[in-house]
Image (cartoon, helix red, strand yellow):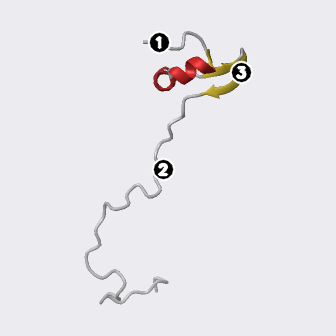
Amino acid sequence: MTIVMNDKIPAGEFKAKCLKVLDEVQRERKQVVITKRGKPVAMLVPVHERRESLIGSMKGTMEILGDIVAPIDVKWNADGE
C-alpha cells in the first residue's frame, strides 16, 4: 500500500498519516520532502543501518576458569636465553 505517490507530502497530510509514511520510507528506502504551503520545510530519510562493531562483540560469551593473575609453576625466560 503506497501512501506517498511522489517524493513530496503536505505537512497536514503527513501529520494525519505519519506512522504509515514512516513505514513506507523504511520499506521503500526512499526520502520524502514535507511541505508547508507548497514550500519544503523538512526531509524524511531512511536510516542507514550500521553493522555491529567487532569490538566487544564477544562480551559475555567466555568464562574464566581458575586464577589468571597468580604466577604459574613453570620457569621461563622472556628473552629466550
* Relative image position of residue 59 (x, y in whole percent): 38, 60
Q: Where residue 24 sits in the image (x, y, percent)? A: 48, 21
Secondary structure of the residue carrying numbered label 2: loop
Q: Can you see residue 68?
A: yes
Of tags 3 and 2, the one toward the viewer is 3
Q: Quadrant of residue 45?
A: top right
- The residue beneath circle 2 is 53
Which residue lies under the disc numbered 1? 2
Q: Which residue is rendered at x = 51% and y = 41% of the image?
A: 50
Q: Earlier in the sequence, mark 3 or mark 1?
A: 1
View extreme (top): residue: 5
Image position, residue 2 (x, y; %): 47, 12
The residue that disc 3 covers is 40
The N terminus lies in which quarter of the figure? top left
Crowding around mark 3 (Cα neighbors within 10 Å: few <14, some 14 to 19, many 20+) is some
Q: Is residue 65 above or below residue 58?
A: below
Labelled disc at residue 35: none
Mark 1 vs mark 2: in front? 1
Residue 44, by quadrant, is: top right
**Would you say the residues marked 3 and 1 are in contact, meaning their CB atoms lie under 8 Å apart?**
no
**Whether residue 76 is situated above or below residue 15 in the rendered picture:** below
Report the side of 45 relative to 78 (left or right).
Answer: right
Mark 1 or mark 2, earlier in chain: 1
Q: Residue at x 41, y 54 (%)?
A: 57
User: Which element carries disc 3, helix, strand or loop?
Assistant: strand
Which sits in the foreground, 15 or 2? 15
